[in-house]
C-alpha cells in the first residue's frame, strides 16, 4: 500500500466554548503582561490553540501516512500563522475541523500544514490557524496544495524599532502551559524524555513561546489592545529553556493597503534566535 499525504483529509467537527477561567489560566501560564485578560474584557490571541490541539494531532495522524516522506528523522512544530476574523469573547461557542491543507519541501524537511478554522454559531469564521509541522529530513516529489502565506521578516524594518519586552522564563513555565493548553508532550515536562530526544533538558512548548510573543507584540505595537490584532505569524528556530530570558523585539514594518499597520518581530533566548520571521498585522 502506497504511503501518501492525504491532501484535503478532514477530521471533525469538534465543538467547544470560550471559558472565562480557562482563558485567564492561559494568559497567566504565558505571563501575558496585559491586564485585560484578568478583567475578562478580552481573550488571549493564542488561547484557541488549546481548543484546536486535539484536531491538529488527529489531522496529522490521519492525514500523513508513516513513510509518506522518505528520510524523516523527527516531527516538530515548524511555523504558525493565525488570522483573526472577528473578536473572540467569553462564553462564545465555536465549531472547527482540521484539514490537511498543504505540503512543501524546505531546506530542513517537509512542511505539512493543517488548516483549522473556528467558526461561530452562524458558521462565520472567527479564528483561522495554519498550523505547520516540519518533518525533519523528509522530502516529497512536488508541492501539494496552495502556497502558505508569506511572512518573511523585512530587513529594513530593523531600522524602525518600536520596543521590546523581556520575559523571565520560570522553571515551571512548561508545566503551567501544559495545564492551560492540554499540551503535555513529554519533552516539555520531563528532562529524561527531552534528553532521549536529543535535548539537554525539558523546554517550552512552541506555542507557549509564540503566545508570549503575541503578548509582547500586543503590548508594544497595539497599545495593549488585542482586538486590533488581525494576524500573527512566526517560524520556530530554536527551543526556549526554563530559567532563561525570552526577549521579544518589535519593529515597525509599515502600512498595509487597507490602512492597517504591520509589525515585524523576532524573539531570542540565551543568545539564540528562537522565533524568526515574525509578522503581526493590526487594524487601522
Image: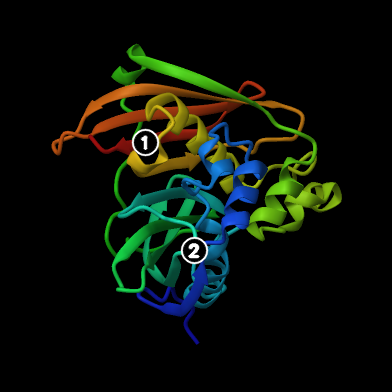
Q: Which residue is mark 2?
A: 91
- Give the image location of residue 97, x and y in percent: 43, 73
Q: Are the residues at dot 2 and dot 1 in contact (C-beta closer than 8 Å)?
A: no
User: Looking at the image, which residue sits at the far bottom?
Assistant: 1
Please state the horizontal and vertical placement of residue 89, each as a whole percent of the image.
Answer: 44, 56
Based on the displayed image, in which of its 4 quarters is residue 231 positioned?
top left
The structure residue drawn at horizontal position 32% and vertical position 20%, both measured from the top left corner, is 157
Residue 113 spot, x, y in % from top left: 42, 60
Check the image and name the residue furthest to the left: 257
Frontmost residue, 24 versus 63:
24
Apparent side of residue 108 relative to residue 193 in the rendered image (left or right): left
Q: Is residue 75 visible?
A: no
* Residue topped by disc 1: 279
Q: Residue at the spot x=36%, y=36% of the render?
A: 280
Q: Residue at x 44, y 24 (%)?
A: 220
The secondary structure type at the circle numbered 2 is loop
How would you rate the neighbour count of disc 1 (Cα within 10 Å): few for under 14, some for 14-19, many for 20 or more? Answer: many
What colour scheme was applied to this rendering of the protein? rainbow
Amino acid at each position: 500500500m502506497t504511503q501518501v499525504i492525504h491532501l484535503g483529509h478532514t477530521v471533525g467537527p469538534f465543538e467547544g466554548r470560550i471559558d472565562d477561567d480557562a482563558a485567564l489560566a492561559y494568559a497567566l501560564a504565558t505571563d501575558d503582561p496585559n491586564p485585560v485578560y484578568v478583567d475578562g474584557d478580552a481573550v488571549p490571541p493564542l488561547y484557541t490553540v488549546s481548543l484546536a490541539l486535539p484536531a491538529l494531532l488527529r489531522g496529522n495522524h490521519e492525514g500523513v501516512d508513516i513513510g509518506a516522506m522518505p528520510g524523516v528523522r523527527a516531527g516538530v512544530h515548524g511555523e504558525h500563522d493565525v488570522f483573526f476574523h472577528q473578536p473572540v469573547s467569553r462564553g462564545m461557542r465555536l465549531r472547527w475541523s482540521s484539514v490537511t491543507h498543504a505540503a512543501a519541501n524546505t531546506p530542513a524537511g517537509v512542511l505539512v500544514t493543517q488548516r483549522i478554522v473556528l467558526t461561530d454559531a452562524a458558521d462565520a469564521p472567527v479564528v483561522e490557524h495554519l498550523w505547520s509541522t516540519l518533518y525533519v529530513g523528509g522530502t516529497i516529489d512536488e508541492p501539494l496544495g496552495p502556497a502558505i502565506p508569506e511572512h518573511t521578516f523585512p530587513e529594513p524594518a530593523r531600522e524602525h524599532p518600536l520596543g521590546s519586552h523581556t520575559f523571565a522564563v520560570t522553571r515551571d513555565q512548561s508545566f503551567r502551559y501544559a495545564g492551560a493548553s492540554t499540551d503535555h508532550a513529554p519533552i516539555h515536562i520531563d528532562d529524561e524524555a527531552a534528553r532521549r530526544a536529543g535535548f539537554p533538558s525539558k523546554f517550552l512548548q512552541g506555542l507557549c513561546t509564540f503566545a508570549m510573543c503575541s503578548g509582547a507584540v500586543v503590548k508594544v505595537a497595539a497599545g495593549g489592545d488585542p482586538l486590533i490584532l488581525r494576524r500573527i505569524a512566526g517560524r520556530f528556530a530554536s527551543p526556549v529553556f526554563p530559567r532563561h530570558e525570552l526577549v521579544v523585539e518589535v519593529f515597525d514594518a509599515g502600512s498595509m493597503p487597507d490602512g492597517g499597520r504591520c509589525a515585524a518581530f523576532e524573539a531570542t533566548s540565551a543568545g539564540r534566535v528562537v522565533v524568526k520571521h515574525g509578522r503581526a498585522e493590526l487594524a487601522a
